[in-house]
C-alpha cells in the first residue's frame, strides 16, 4: 500500500463532512467536556513509515486501551496464572456490566470488560505499592512507543474516582467472591490511574507496533502473548460491539471511552484512531466508521 497519505486524508475529510460524532462519555466529567468533533488517524507500517492525518499530535485519555498494556504487563509478570481468575470469552454485555458476575461466581468473562480489567490490575499489583504497578504499565507503554513523553493525568483519575460508582460496585462484588487480592479501593485507584494515561494518536500507533509482529519493534511482549492479546482484542476488544467491529473492520482492535481505538493488522500495520464521540456500545463512533473505511480501502483483514 504505497499511497496511504492521500487515503488517510480522504478518510479524515469524509469523517469531518459526515459530522456524525456521537457523544463523549458522560460519566467522567473530564471526558464529558471534550469537544466530540475531533478526529485523528495514524498508521505505522512494517517498513518503518508513520503516516497520519487530522489531530494526530493531540493528547487524549486512552482509558480502556490501557487494558491492553496492563494485560501485557500482567501476562509478563504472572503468565497463565491469570486465567484461573479471568476468562477468555466475549461477554456480550456492556463494558461495565455486572450481570454475569453473579452466575459465574465472580470470574469475569475476559480481561477487557471492566470487571476483568480490575482483576488483571489486581494481579499486577500482587501486594506491591500501586505506584510500582503503575510505573510498570507506564514504562511498558513508553518502551513500546519509544517515547518517554507519555504520562498519567491525575485529574482524570480523580474525576473517575469521584463518579465511578459502577466500577466500585464491580470491585466490591469481585472481592465478595474472593477474586481480589488487594483492598478494593487500592485496586480501583490503580485501575483509574492506569485508564488516565494520555497519549497522542501517533504515540498510540507507535506503541501498537509490538502487537503487529514487526521485526525490530521494541520487544516488550513475547510472540506467544502477541497472538493471545490479539485474539482477545478481536473477540472482546469492543465489548458487546466486538462482533460488529470484526464484521465491519476484520482486524483486532481495542477501544476506550476516551474515543481511542488501537487496531492491529498483523505483520502489516499498527493503526490508532481517535474521535471522542461514542456509539451506543461506548466505542468511538467516527473512529469505528474510519476503521471500516480504512480496511475496505486497503483490504487489510485477518479473514
Ligand atoms: N475508565 C473507564 C471505566 O472503567 C474505562 C472504560 C472504557 O474505556 O471502555 O469505566
Image (cartoon, rainbow, N blue to C red):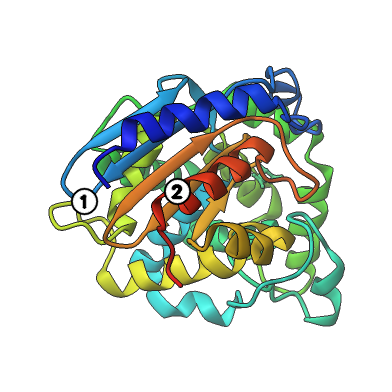
Q: Mark 2 points at which residue?
A: 297
Contact flag, marks 1 and 2 (Cβ < 8 Å): no
At which x and y percent is residue 153? 53, 25
Give the residue at x 51% y 55%. Answer: 253
- Image quarter for ligand 1: top right
Name the outermost residue toward the left.
216
At which x and y percent is residue 272? 44, 40
Give the residue at x 65% y 40%. Answer: 284
- Label 2: state its secondary structure: helix
The label on residue 139 is none
Residue 199 visible, this angle: no
Q: Which of marks 1 and 2 is nearer the N terminus?
A: 1
Q: Mark 1 points at which residue?
A: 46
What count of labels does the image hold?
Answer: 2
Q: In this view, does 291 lie to the left or right of 166?
A: left
Residue 14 visible, this angle: yes
Q: As displayed, is residue 270 above or below residue 278?
A: below
Q: In this view, does 282 lie to the left or right of 299?
A: right
Q: Distance between the residues labelled 1 and 2?
A: 18 Å
Q: As displayed, is residue 111 above or below residue 26?
A: below
- Label 1: state its secondary structure: loop
At which x and y percent is residue 83? 53, 79
Quarter of the image where one finds residue 8? top left
Q: Is residue 216 left or right of residue 74?
A: left
Q: As displayed, is residue 100 above or below residue 214?
A: below
- Mark 1 vs mark 2, foreground winner is 2
Amino acid at each position: 500500500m504505497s499511497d496511504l497519505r492521500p487515503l488517510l486524508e480522504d478518510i479524515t475529510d469524509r469523517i469531518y463532512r459526515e459530522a456524525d460524532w456521537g457523544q463523549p462519555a458522560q460519566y467522567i466529567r473530564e471526558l464529558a467536556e471534550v469537544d466530540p468533533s475531533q478526529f485523528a488517524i495514524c498508521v505505522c507500517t512494517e517498513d518503518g513509515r508513520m503516516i497520519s492525518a487530522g489531530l494526530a499530535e493531540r493528547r487524549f485519555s486512552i482509558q480502556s486501551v490501557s487494558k491492553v498494556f496492563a494485560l501485557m504487563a500482567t501476562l509478563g509478570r504472572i503468565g497463565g496464572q491469570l486465567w484461573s481468575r479471568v476468562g477468555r470469552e466475549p461477554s456480550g454485555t456492556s463494558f461495565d456490566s455486572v450481570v454475569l458476575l453473579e452466575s459465574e461466581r465472580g470470574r469475569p468473562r475476559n480481561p477487557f470488560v471492566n470487571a476483568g480489567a480490575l482483576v488483571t490490575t489486581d494481579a499486577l499489583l500482587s501486594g506491591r505499592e500501586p505506584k510500582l504497578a503503575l510505573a510498570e504499565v507506564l514504562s511498558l507503554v513508553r518502551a513500546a512507543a519509544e517515547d518517554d513523553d507519555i504520562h498519567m493525568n491525575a485529574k482524570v483519575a480523580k474525576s473517575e474516582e469521584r463518579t465511578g460508582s459502577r466500577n466500585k460496585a464491580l470491585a466490591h462484588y469481585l472481592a465478595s467472591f474472593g477474586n481480589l487480592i488487594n483492598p478494593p479501593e487500592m485496586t480501583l485507584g490503580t485501575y483509574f490511574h492506569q485508564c488516565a494515561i494520555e497519549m497522542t494518536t501517533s504515540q498510540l500507533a507507535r506503541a501498537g507496533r509490538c502487537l503487529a509482529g514487526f521485526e525490530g519493534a521494541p520487544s516488550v511482549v513475547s510472540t506467544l502473548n502477541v497472538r493471545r492479546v490479539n485474539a482477545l482484542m478481536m473477540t472482546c476488544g469492543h465489548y458487546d460491539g466486538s462482533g460488529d467491529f470484526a464484521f465491519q473492520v476484520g482486524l483486532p482492535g481495542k477501544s476506550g471511552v476516551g474515543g481511542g481505538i488501537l487496531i492491529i493488522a498483523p505483520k502489516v500495520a499498527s493503526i490508532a484512531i481517535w474521535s471522542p464521540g461514542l456509539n451506543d456500545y461506548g466505542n468511538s463512533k467516527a473512529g469505528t466508521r474510519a476503521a471500516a473505511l480504512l480496511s475496505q480501502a486497503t483490504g487489510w483483514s485477518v479473514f
